[in-house]
Amino acid sequence: MADAIAAPAGRPHVSQVRVRYAETDQMGVAYYANYLVWFEVARTDWLRAAGLTYRRLEEDGLFLPVIDAQCRYRAPARYDDTLDVRAVARLVSPARLAFEYDITGPGGAVASGTTVHAFTDSRGRPRRVPATIKDLLG
């Protein structure tokens, strides 16, 4: 579904997604919840570009549950549109990471939003952001 456009770790990363028919309503407009899925695609690609994967983090006992998500819709995404989903990460506390997203399509701005993630262990207890991740964010 997504082809990543490479970006250095710690910098904005852009992923491309194409709106699939299954992601639209009868009018060909993307269903609103899919924007959060596209945020996840960009976030996962950002991690990969930084040399990390969710699998690796979890193997190391570190989890990043979403504790807040927001999306502001600007214009509809439609069936077969190719969208650029820009993601950038920043620390918001010693135990939280936020991603900011901008989605653009053929006509310009489509949506923007944020997700906030808590660093936790496998039992859901808070953990501090590891130094390796702090280093990625500059």
Image (tube, rainbow, N blue to C red):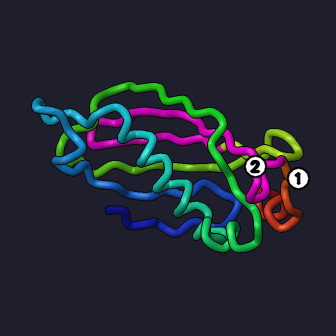
Instruction: Work out which residue is located at the far left of the displayed protein and give it.
Output: 26
Q: Quadrant of the C terminus?
A: bottom right
| Quadrant assignment, res 29 | top left
Viewer-proximal residue, 91 or 124? 124
* Residue 108 % position (x, y): 35, 36
Q: What residue is shown at x 88% (from left), y 52% (from top)?
A: 128
Q: Which residues are magenta?
A: 99-125
Numbered badge on residue 44:
none
Q: What residue is shown at x 62% (from left), y 64% (from top)?
A: 47
* Residue 38 % position (x, y): 42, 48
Q: Is residue 91 left or right of residue 98?
A: right
Residue kind at label 2, given as amino acid type: Gly
> Which residue in the protein does label 2 denote?
124
Viewer-proximal residue, 102 or 124? 124
Q: Is residue 48 visible?
A: yes
Instruction: Work out which residue is located at the far front of the displayed protein and give it.
Output: 123
Q: Secondary structure at mark 2?
A: loop
Q: Which marked residue is nearer to the observer: mark 1 or mark 2?
A: 2
Q: Are marks 1 and 2 in contact (CB under 8 Å)?
A: no
Q: Is residue 49 visible?
A: no
For the residue carrying disc 1, how many other residues have a C-alpha within 10 Å: few (<14), some (14-19), or many (20+)?
Answer: some
Q: CA distance from mark 1 to mark 2?
A: 12 Å
> Which residue in the protein does label 1 denote?
128
Q: Quadrant of the N terminus?
A: bottom left
Residue kind at label 1, given as amino acid type: Arg
